[in-house]
Image: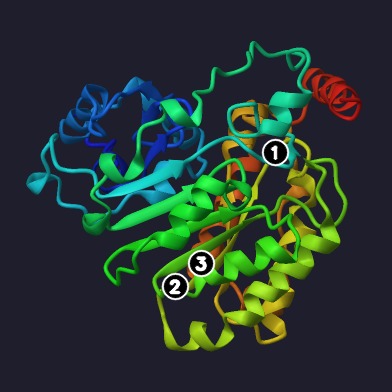
Amino acid sequence: MDTQDNRCSVPFNGMTVLSLHTKKITPCCKITPVNFDSELLTEFHKELRQSMLDNKRHKSCNSCYKIEDRGGASLRNRTTDNNFDYNQAHIDDPIESIQVIFSNKCQMMCSYCNPGFSSMWQEKQKKFIPGTNSVPIELISENDQINLEKLVDLDNLKWLRITGGEPLIQDRCVDFLLNLPPNPIRKIGITTNLSYGDSVMNTFLSIINRHDNITISCSLDAVGDNISRKYLNWELWQKNYKIIAENLQDRLTRFKNLKITTIITISILNYKNLQALVEYLLDYRKTGIKGTTFTFNYVSLDEKLSLKSANLDMSSKIMLSDDYCALLTPQEKIMIDGFNKLLNNVQLNTVLQNQTDTFLEWYNKI
């Protein structure tokens, strides 16, 4: 009898992703979104929850199960609540945590991104990415979008995360954040690429100072000028990161729920350079900066590098000194162990390398 635990708490207490610019919704960032009109809890969402209550693998979650079957650490492993009480859960329980995407407006073209999340990609992409079936996404005008305040009971939300595009260059999103009443019960998260000037930075600090229970997620995928993030200004990123970290030091001491985290999206272009990136972030802690953490996003690695091979790519494992290891949080240690474990079953073969070279040639031209 199979006693394996296939359940995941994310469809119940995780982040439901709401895209206002496409009128699409998904209970997990790894699952293909479905259309919605005015109800956050779709029939698909209920079906997924029922699978978890029945301890059955749902086909929409195969990306996580495949990683686990080969010994890797999936998003399910990293985000599910092991103490979640499935006996008290129901398929029609209200959604209490949402991630909102106002639009795809963005001033960057990250290599793993697409037109749905970057207006720069939308503007520059004149032909399909080689080797994929990607097509430009149909976006809905702001006039046709659903009003977020009417759709969601903001006061009763436990988690509200704002992403994009780049949220801080979107007027509608900035106005929403500046006018959002503080609520000590509600956690707020804002994901940003930190690629903007002093005026936007000052507005961002004004938003941050309105809320005590807030996580600022800074997106970064390599140290210095690199091919992973087109139009990245590395000096500007460092400057803004330092401003946020130093500006919040006093508040970080007083408010335990205030956090700064750096999101590292691992892709075929940067996975061999993660050593330098992790050490760069840990160096901030050596200087006494408090509250800065990092997290891995495996999505690109899972999709582009998860190939079984008899040969192991041992050279790309993250190896840290005892000095650096002492600065890691328990969750960061788990993530690094999971990444290293994943590489035990991955090999960048000739075919994939050729596809990568073709993509880079095209990516650097547009």
Tell me whether the residue at label 3 lies in contact with that at label 2, contact meaning CB atoms closer than 8 angstroms. Answer: yes
Name the residue at 56% across, 48% down: 171
Query: Residue at position x 34%, y 69% from top?
Result: 182
Q: Are marks 2 and 1 in contact (CB under 8 Å)?
A: no
For residue 99, side relative to residue 93 (left or right):
right
Q: Which residue is mark 2?
A: 210
Q: Which residue is mark 1?
A: 267
Q: Is residue 296 above or below residue 23?
A: below
* Image x and y of residue 340, in percent: 63, 50
Residue designated by label 3: 207
Q: CA distance from mark 1 to mark 3?
A: 31 Å
The residue positioned farthest toward the front in the image shown: 143
The crowd level at tag 2 (other Cα within 10 Å; few <14, some 14-19, many 20+) is: some
Distance of label 2 from label 1 (alpha carbons): 35 Å
Placement of 182 over or under 152, stated as above or below: below
For badge 3, the amino acid type reads Ile
Image quadrant in which you'd find residue 56: top left
Q: Is residue 173 above or below residue 147?
A: below
Q: Quadrant of residue 92?
A: top left
The earlier-in-sequence mark between 2 and 1 is 2
Give the residue type at disc 2: Arg
